[in-house]
Image (cartoon, helix red, strand yellow):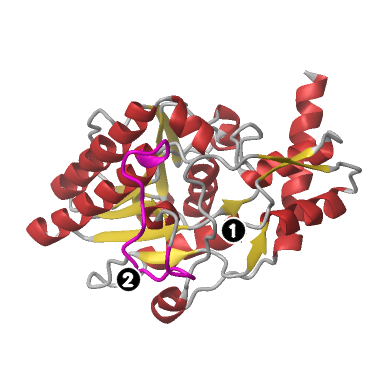
């Protein structure tokens, strides 16, 4: 289905991005517009920020719509990128029931739209479906170790049932679907108060505050720069109908939380000190992707090293904090 027309009559693909005002959604919208798509963005601004898409509002090929994906949405699209869901623990735990509903009802509504219009649907899942993993690094074949009634289950189990819905639509309706599992990602347009480890540490370092480490800081994470992740999204959407995923997208370079904090202090040039607080409930001890499938099927692997990405991200947050202070 080609629903758009560019200047001179050439067909333009029409893409829907849910969660378009979020960190990933806004970066994805940029990339799709550069590829020549017409983009409609949906967001209810629960965690998305209008300033993330302000630079796009004058683009005639971009339209922003305030909409909650828990309600159906109508339109004709060639591609649907379903990213809408609060993804940081402070945000998704602030209204756990809403988070679970967004995962289930939001995904159900986007699948129904894809079925009606014949669109290819991209579903943004998460490494949190692996829970506190007993297998390391985590391949896509690992079924996970998740607490179904813990404080994180609204998100973890919400994303697991969302994947189940996607693959049931695939089996019952032969829907054209693509599923990626996103590991820790960072970069410009992260929310400074979203509670994620990279944004927390950078903001604390820029302000010269003590950097808060939970536990001893020996728990590990992998950190993928946003440009690399978006490249993986676009590669996934170019694969054939028979490859659905799920496929891990993340940087397999593994760092302890303490190593991350020390690198951020160095990059920022801060005098911040490290302080320790108890680990949150169900906080995973280790998280690192096996990306062999992404290398094989997508020809993808991350290119931006952690230090390089942190320099770019710190520069963004420095501007954010300066603007907030001036305001």
* Residue 255 in the image, given as x and y percentages of width and height: 66, 63
**Foreground: 213 or 199?**
213
Q: Quadrant of residue 200?
A: top right
* Residue 229 in the image, given as x and y percentages of width and height: 53, 60
Which quadrant does the N terminus fall into? bottom left
Residue furthest top as drawn: 327
- Look at the numbered disc 2 and give the secondary structure of its residue: loop
Q: Which residues are magenta?
A: 134-153
Does the magenta stretch mainly form a helix, a strand or a loop? loop
Q: Earlier in the sequence, mark 1 or mark 2?
A: 2
**Foreground: 195 or 182?**
195
Which quadrant does the C terminus fall into? top right
Q: Is residue 75 visible?
A: no
167 sits to left or right of 231: left
* Residue 221 in the image, given as x and y percentages of width and height: 59, 59
**Residue that carries the numbered disc 2 in the rendered image:** 141
């Amino acid at each position: 289905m080609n629903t758009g027309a560019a200047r001179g009559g050439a067909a333009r693909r029409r893409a829907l991005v849910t969660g378009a005002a979020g960190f990933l959604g806004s970066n994805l919208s940029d990339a799709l517009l550069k590829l020549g798509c017409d983009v409609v963005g949906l967001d209810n601004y629960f965690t998305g920020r209008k300033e993330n898409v302000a630079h796009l509002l004058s683009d005639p090929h971009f339209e922003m719509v305030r909409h909650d994906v828990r309600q159906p949405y109508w339109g004709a699209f060639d591609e649907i990128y379903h990213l809408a869901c609060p993804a940081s623990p402070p945000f998704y735990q602030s209204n756990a029931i809403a988070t679970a509903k967004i995962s289930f009802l939001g995904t159900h509504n986007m699948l129904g739209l894809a079925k009606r219009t014949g669109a290819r649907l991209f579903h943004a899942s998460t490494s949190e479906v692996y829970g506190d993993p007993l297998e390391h690094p985590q391949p896509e074949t690992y079924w996970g170790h998740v607490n179904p009634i813990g404080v994180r289950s609204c998100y973890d189990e919400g994303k697991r049932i969302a994947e189940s819905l996607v693959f049931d639509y695939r089996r019952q309706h032969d829907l054209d679907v693509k599923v990626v599992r996103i590991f820790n990602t960072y970069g410009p347009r992260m929310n400074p108060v979203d509670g994620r480890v990279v944004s927390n540490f950078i903001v604390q370092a820029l302000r010269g505050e003590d950097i808060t480490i939970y536990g001893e800081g020996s728990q590990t994470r992998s950190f993928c720069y946003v440009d690399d992740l978006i490249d993986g999204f676009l590669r996934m959407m170019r694969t054939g109908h028979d490859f659905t995923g799920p496929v891990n997208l993340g940087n397999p370079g593994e760092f302890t939380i303490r190593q991350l904090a020390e690198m951020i202090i160095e990059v920022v040039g801060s005098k911040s000190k490290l302080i320790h607080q108890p680990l949150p409930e169900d906080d995973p001890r280790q998280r690192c992707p096996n990306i062999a499938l992404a290398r094989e099927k997508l020809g993808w692997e991350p290119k931006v090293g952690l230090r390089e990405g942190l320099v770019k991200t710190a520069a963004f947050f420095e501007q954010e904090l300066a603007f907030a202070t001036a305001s």
